[in-house]
């Protein structure tokens, strides 16, 4: 187990481990490695591959699909920047 970060640790991808900030049973903040993946509560592990894309709980859907997890079972990912995986389809023209 290493304690110093390496250059390859700079990018976090779905299913990989990353440092997260959680609270232990005594209420102390603790940094620990966790998989970057958000799976709805009670769903089995195969859910991650059968329904890809469950690793990104967007703010506009926290009270919808993710309401069972938001405020209940989550942590803070420590990051400087964020890149979202979106398709490169052409932008729609703006209305005139």
Image (spheres, helix red, strand yellow):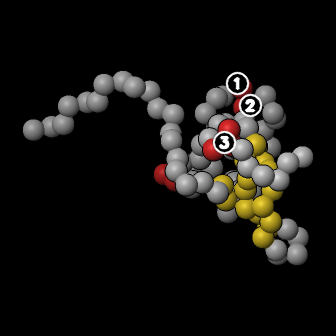
Name the residue: 26% across, 30% down: 92
Dot 1 lies on which element?
helix
Q: Which mark is residue 47?
A: 2
Please state which of residues 1 and 13 is positioned toward the viewer in this rendering. 1
In space, the residues marked 2 and 3 are separated at their CA atoms by 31 Å
In space, the residues marked 1 and 3 are separated at their CA atoms by 31 Å
Q: Which mark is residue 7?
A: 3
Residue 53 in the image: x percent, y percent? 61, 33
Q: Which mark is residue 70?
A: none
Residue 34 in the image: x percent, y percent? 78, 48
Q: Quadrant of residue 25?
A: bottom right
Q: What residue would you read off at disc 1?
A: 50
Name the residue: 66% across, 28% down: 51
Relative horizontal placement of residue 94, taking residue 29 as reference (left or right): left
**Badge 3: few (under 14), some or many (20 or more) residues near its Cα, within 10 Å?**
few
* Of pointers 1 and 3, the one earlier in the residue sequence: 3
User: Do the residues bearing badges 1 and 2 touch, measured as CB atoms within 8 Å?
Assistant: yes
Name the residue: 73% across, 62% down: 21
**Badge 1: few (under 14), some or many (20 or more) residues near its Cα, within 10 Å?**
few
Residue 77 in the image: x percent, y percent? 66, 55
Dot 3 lies on which element?
helix
Name the residue: 36% across, 24% down: 89
Please state which of residues 58 and 16 is positioned toward the viewer in this rendering. 16
């Amino acid at each position: 187990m290493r304690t110093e970060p390496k250059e390859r640790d700079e990018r976090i991808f779905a299913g990989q481990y990353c440092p997260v900030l959680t609270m232990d049973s005594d209420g102390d903040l603790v940094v620990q490695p966790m998989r970057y993946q958000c799976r709805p509560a009670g769903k089995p592990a195969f859910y991650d591959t059968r329904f890809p894309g469950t690793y990104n709980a967007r703010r506009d859907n926290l009270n919808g699909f993710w309401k069972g997890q938001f405020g209940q079972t989550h942590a803070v990912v420590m990051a400087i920047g964020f890149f979202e995986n979106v398709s490169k389809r052409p932008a729609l023209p703006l209305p005139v």
